[in-house]
Amino acid sequence: MDANNRMPARDAEGYLVEPTEWDEDVAAHLARELDIDLEDDHWDVIRYMRTLYDDRRVAPDARHIIKHLEERYPGAGRKRLFELFPYGYPAQACKIAGMKRPRAWSTG
């Protein structure tokens, strides 16, 4: 958020128009709007998504996030992703992580 606590511009669906304007305060605000209480695993996924975004400049596919979660939850990465973001990876995780709306995605 900017110095005046204003949210960056968003599109009609609530995704950031410019992902570089994202920060963790923006993530916390977006999570509150989506009724998600961010816990350690949420932050782990969000920060990992941002790392991948910084490298590739596109929202990472859910399969990459599932693989990341598999390291902590062997055999249950997909299940854990949907426990964290029950209304879907693009609708919640991508939005909170400050991604533009993905054009297409895999749910793993």
Image: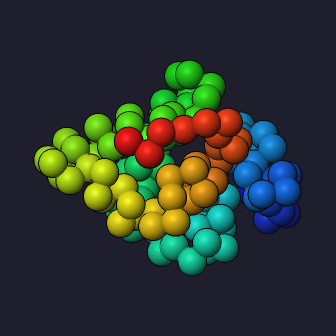
| Residue at the image position 33 percent from the left and 43 percent from the top | 66
- Residue extending farthest to the top is 56
**Direction from residue 39 to residue 71 in the image, left or right:** left
Q: Is residue 79 above or below residue 99?
A: below
Q: Quadrant of the N terminus?
A: bottom right
**Between residues 7 and 70, which one lies in front from this camera angle?**
70
**Between residues 11 and 103, which one lies in front from this camera angle?**
103
Quarter of the view holding residue 95: bottom right
Q: Quadrant of the C terminus?
A: top left
**Between residues 88 and 39, which one lies in front from this camera angle?**
88
**Between residues 10 and 61, which one lies in front from this camera angle?**
61
Q: Could you tell me if residue 25 is visible in this image?
A: no
| Residue at the image position 79 percent from the left and 65 percent from the top | 5
Quarter of the view holding residue 58: top right
**Direction from residue 42 to residue 15 in the image, left or right:** right
| Residue at the image position 69 percent from the left and 44 percent from the top | 101
- Position of residue 69 measured from the top left corner of the image (x, y, whole percent): 28, 46
